[in-house]
Image (cartoon, coloured by chain):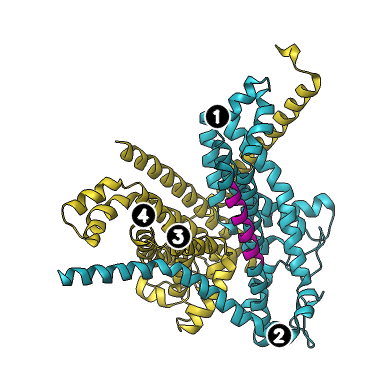
Chain colours: A yellow, B cyan
Amino acid sequence: MKGDISGRRRAYALAMKALMGISVILTASLVAFLLIYVLAKGFPHITWQLLSTKPSYLSDTVGILPDILNTVYVIIAALVFVLPLGVGAAVYLTEYASNKKVVELIEYAAETLSGIPSIIYGLVGMLFFCEFLGFQTSLLAGSLTLVIMNLPTVMRTAQESLKTVPQSYREGAFGLGAGKWRVIRTVVLPNCIDGVVTGCILSIGRILGESAALLFTAGFAHELNNIVEGLSHAGATLTVALYFYAKEEGEFEIAFAIAAILMILTVLINLLAAFAGKYFKRKNNI
Amino acid sequence: MKNRQLLENIIHGIFFVLGMVTVGSVLLITVYLIISGLPAIKEIGLKEFLLGKTWASTASEPKYGILPFILTSIYGTAGAIVLGVPIGFFTAVYLSKMAPPKVKAVMQEAVSLLAGIPSVVYGLVGMIVLVPGIRELFNVPDGASLLCAIIVLAIMILPSIIKVSITALDAVPKEYEDASLALGATPIETYFRVSVPAAKSGIATAVVLGVGRAIGEAMAVMMVSGNAPNMPSLFQSVRFLTTAVASEMGYSSGLQRQALFSIALVLFVFILMINGALNFFLKGGKENNK
């Protein structure tokens, strides 16, 4: 068989195989390097003192507890707003909208939103939430900016799962005399919970990694606050703190410690997303 | 009965409003960028602003020319595409067509991880590994340069390119490949001369997504590119459109601040053009499948 193929064709196959081999190995070792390097450099500097205190000039120590809490506050606040908005938009698109032009308009808008760079969100968020609405530089303003950013993600995942709700469920409910709202509330929404969960996980991952949009909306402060105080004050999330310590202060040990924490969280969120995807797939197949 | 109809209508209205929030957000962003971006352009002059070669916003006689930023963004993005697309493309072909299922699954997880790593972490590793590396390897005074930014951006666009290309390649009908194999083509020839052309609109989409991600990245680039407003050159400290906005926003005022909004407006126009290209390729893909 091999004799049938000319030398040129064999050389072509060999060259393509080599290129593929090099590319895959490069990609794989890149991921491995990043993971191992960041963990190795950051892990030794993650101490209990770092995790449990706030920065203190008196004792000249740095702690990132405020940054951890700020990140949690921002995630909670953003999800509280983005989930109803995103799911509501998805319900409108799949259950109500009858005008094709309107559907196209909304989908086009969502596509445009997901292409806008985060620095532009940060700028408009600063102008609109911080200045026009008077929220000042605060975690709330940052969270609201992130709401707009994550809206397309949540809308799309909710839409996908609404599409998997069998039409016969709706028809059955209508046949029993239920109104549209009742059908949505009792039949459609409970069945799109997997889309909501997936959207949640994706959004958390994105919020965790976001920095450019928060720089000018949520600010730099490292103060310990509870969630209510926290949202109305300026505060740095973990990513912004990393940027601050690396670029402005040159404190690379702390920066790498934060990077290692972010890396671990990213791995966890990816595993969670993969697990959720598999779980829902199996559930839907039954 | 009448009450129920009223309730239904109200709820319909509420959902309509929720659906329109996305449209409203796009309008809000567009209007804000135009309103806040135009005054400075008017005052400086469009030609002066877009084609001026010097940016000296804090000088006693300030100059606001953003050509260096525009060119840096274009060169940086082009460089990232030149480096990143071939690697991503070949990886995607291998994973979609040749890899054993286990390898494919593990690599896909790895690529998702690459996509999920925060951009500041890329910036940090770039600062510590790449910047000194470039300084020593090429013997230049400072490694924070356009080249460094290009490498970081190339790595950052890899996941979008690989993921979208794999989806496109996986969707190629098996019959095409079977037919090609039956006609005597080798598997490799089949993958590259039948499957890849069949998936070309998907792969083009992947590249355009990569362009969008590269041109919009701010934080990682800010940490590795040096941030001096020079005309772009591979080993010089440069400033991108995104980092121009980010690096001066904190302390700017007056015309300087307005000029930063104008830069954001220019960046936004770039993004809209990229979105247009994206829609074009997506539509092309749909028509091909019919």
Label 1: chain? Answer: B
Q: Residue at x 40, y 64 (%)?
A: A82
Magenta region, residue range = B270-285
Give the residue type at disc 1. Answer: Lys
Residue carrying label 1? B174
Residue carrying label 2? B42
Residue carrying label 4? A196
Any part of residue A250 in sight:
no
| Mark sitting on residue A51 | 3
- Tag 2 secondary structure: helix
- Tag 3 secondary structure: helix
Badges 2 and 3, same chain: no
Q: Residue at x 69, y 27 (%)?
A: B189
Kindly report the distance in space between the C-alpha atoms of the residues bearing marks 4 and 3.
Answer: 31 Å
Q: Residue at x 42, y 58 (%)?
A: A154
| For discs 4 and 3, the disc positioned in front in the rendered view | 4
Give the residue type at disc 2. Answer: Lys
Main SS, magenta region, reads helix
Kindly report the distance in space between the C-alpha atoms of the residues bearing marks 1 and 4.
Answer: 34 Å
Label 3: chain? Answer: A
Q: Nearer the viewer, residue A101 or B281?
A: A101
Q: Quadrant of residue B275?
A: bottom right
Q: Is A203 placed above or below A275 here?
A: below
Badges 1 and 4, same chain: no
| Dot 1 crowding, Cα within 10 Å, few <14, some 14–19, many 20+ | few
Q: Is residue B259 left or right of residue A195?
A: right
Give the residue type at disc 4. Answer: Val
| For discs 2 and 1, the disc positioned in front in the rendered view | 1
